[in-house]
Image (spheres, helix red, strand yellow):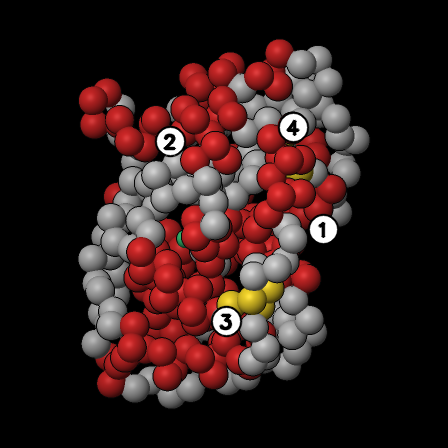
Amino acid sequence: MPQYCETPNPTEWDERMGPASKDHTDFRRYPRGDAASGVREHYRKMRSRQTVAYNQRVREKYLDFKRPMGMWEVIEKLNQLVDVSDPDVSLPNAQHGVQSAAAVRRDQGPDWLELVALIHDAGKILFLWGCEDDGTSPAEQWGIVGDTFVVGCRLPDTCVYPELNPLNPDMEDERYSTVLGCYQPGCGLDRVTLSWGHDEYLYQVLSHHRGNRLPEQAMAQIRYHSFYPWHREGSYRELMGPKDGEYLEWVHQLNTYDLYSKSDEVYDLNEVEPYYTPLIERYLGNEPILW
Ligand code: FE
Ligand code: FE
């Protein structure tokens, strides 16, 4: 585990940022009826196409670690992507990362947590080399974003739009449609396969990156932050292992900043870059990361 550095003193730039003004109940309200079209359609595709077989195929395809790119460059490129699954955000994803990191800074959280908040969605960069068929293009994001779930066992009713669960072909396969499915009780989250998307992609990319000095806590936050049926709704308890209670606390720590920092504030990326680049280098080194 690395030594944590002190958060630098607040600057004028911090003072510009007042507290997030929305109430917590204003977030994650999933629209119904006509208003639901985009978000619900995203979940319809995700739920019906993210199967065990799909997961095996895309993991093999995208985890080849052949594309060198620095983390800040990735963040900048995310200024071209708006998450179609998010009912709370219509700004590009780079803004969401900076807003989340700024919220950690406002609370004087540890610097590694500030970095995790900044980069937690960096796996969405998949859109640059994705394709429609895999759900990894900007138009088809069902293989990049949205709440994740476990593939290989029964979908719980705690998923958003649970009426879409029967559309998943694995729910008709007796190996994958029971509560435990293909898993052993208490096997631990590190041994289950989550639906494919930006969480797992970034986790795998950083696990493979030699310069990675992020603590274990950060890696769990990255890997499980979209796993709402587990971290918010309390499902999948039968799969949890001895470490996962701790994981849950860690994931809740990031979630506060991921969710409740969302606002209309737009940052000039050029203005904040000199602050974030040294932070990135402190924990990820200055060699390019292989995506
Ligand atoms: Fe995310
Ligand atoms: Fe996020």
Counting from the top left corner in percent of width and height, residue 272 is at 32, 77
29 shown above or below 66: above
Depth check: 130 or 200 in front?
Answer: 130
Q: Name the residue under label 3.
A: 70
Task: State the residue at coordinates (60%, 64%).
Answer: 290
Task: Provide the secondary structure element on which disc 4 rests.
Answer: helix
Counting from the top left corner in percent of width and height, residue 183 is at 75, 30
Identity of the amino acid at label 2?
His
Q: Mark 2 points at which residue?
A: 42
Q: Mark 1 points at which residue?
A: 243
Crowdedness near tag 1: few (<14), some (14–19) or many (≥20) residues, C-alpha within 10 Å: few
For discs 2 and 4, the disc positioned in front in the rendered view: 4
Quarter in which the N terminus is drawn: bottom right
N-term mark: 1 or 4: 4
N-term mark: 2 or 4: 2
Q: Mark 4 points at which residue?
A: 53
Identity of the amino acid at label 1?
Lys
Whether residue 103 is visible: no
Task: Provide the secondary structure element on which disc 2 rests.
Answer: helix
